[in-house]
Image (tube, helix red, strand yellow):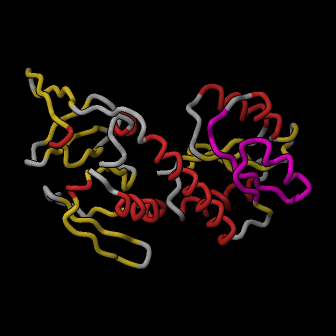
């Protein structure tokens, strides 16, 4: 799930952009309305994956935010003025959208972000990832090898591992943090609630033109879908899979 924030002082524009993003299954973490508010929030919170930012704000230009803070997030500037395009690309910007925002233009911007993320994902393959995990099971500690993990999922704000044998174990950390310890060659986060191992996939079918349904082994008692914004990178992961 792509996490993003919107920096926009026009309420109608902010709401419209958020609707477009939610329709594309991006998670809008917050809406910020000024340079001052944005500086404070970004200094105190984890940086999102993507920032959609107007340039002209009530208390200055949003460029002031990115001149004062070092942020890893990719930025897409949204503005009614095209004279800022050159300066925008000096601030980690990957795209530039003109108001009124068109859905097709937004799709192109998101696709560009996903392509850049895929490149970064390949670079992450250089990292060393855990092969064994220590799990608490009742009063005992149990070791689980990475080859035994079928998928990891969150349920009622709690994270669990499901093994190839169908065993279910509680994890004392968030799905997001645990996912960072998994080799992306082997595992893929298909939606906000689940990370799966390649070998756990038993069947894939199109549920609709924009929905991909997955059957898992061991099976689960509910329907599992790949998030709309993850379908394309998911297909790329399948094509490039190596064990």
Image-based side of 181 in relation to 13, left or right: left
Which quadrant would residue 30 be assigned to in this image? Answer: top right
**Residue 208, placed above or below residue 112:** below
Closest to the observer: 73 or 208? Answer: 73
Determine the residue positioned at 26% across, 50% down. 243
Image-based side of 133 in relation to 25, left or right: left
Determine the residue positioned at 34% across, 76% down. 206
Q: Position of residue 239 (x, y in %)?
A: 37, 63
Closest to the observer: 172 or 94? Answer: 94
Number of marks in the image? 0
Image-based side of 19 in relation to 155, left or right: right
Whether residue 36 appears in magenta in the rendering, the answer is: no
Q: Which residues are magenta?
A: 71-96
Q: Residue furthest right?
A: 83
Q: Position of residue 196 (x, y in %)?
A: 28, 51
Whether residue 89 appears in magenta in the rendering, the answer is: yes
Image-based side of 134 in relation to 225, left or right: left
Closest to the observer: 132 or 35? Answer: 132
Q: Position of residue 218 (x, y in %)?
A: 13, 55
Determine the residue positioned at 80% across, 63% down. 99
Q: Residue furthest bottom?
A: 209
Q: Position of residue 190 (x, y in %)?
A: 36, 56
Which quadrant would residue 74 be assigned to in this image? Answer: top right
**Residue 149, placed above or below residue 65:** below
């Amino acid at each position: 799930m792509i996490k993003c924030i919107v920096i926009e002082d026009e309420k109608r524009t902010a709401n419209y952009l958020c609707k477009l993003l939610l329709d594309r299954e991006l998670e809008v973490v917050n809406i910020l309305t000024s340079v001052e508010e944005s500086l404070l929030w970004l200094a105190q919170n984890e940086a999102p994956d993507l920032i959609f930012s107007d340039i002209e704000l009530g208390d200055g230009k949003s460029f002031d935010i990115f001149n004062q803070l070092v942020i890893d997030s990719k930025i897409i500037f949204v503005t009614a003025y095209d004279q800022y395009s050159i300066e925008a690309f000096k601030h980690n910007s990957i795209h530039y959208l003109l108001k009124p925002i068109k859905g097709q233009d937004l799709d192109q911007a998101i696709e560009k972000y996903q392509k850049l993320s895929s490149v970064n994902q390949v670079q992450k393959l250089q990292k060393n990832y855990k092969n064994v995990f220590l799990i608490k099971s009742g009063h005992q500690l149990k070791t689980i090898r990475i080859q035994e993990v079928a998928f990891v999922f969150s349920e009622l704000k709690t994270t669990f591992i499901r093994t190839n044998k169908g065993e279910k174990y509680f994890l004392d950390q968030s799905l997001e943090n645990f996912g960072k310890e998994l080799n992306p060659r082997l595992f893929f986060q298909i939606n906000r609630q689940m990370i799966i191992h390649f070998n756990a996939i038993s069947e894939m079918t199109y549920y609709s033109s924009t929905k991909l349904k997955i059957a898992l082994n061991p099976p689960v008692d509910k329907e599992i879908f790949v998030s709309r914004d993850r379908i394309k990178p998911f297909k790329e992961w399948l094509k490039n899979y190596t064990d």
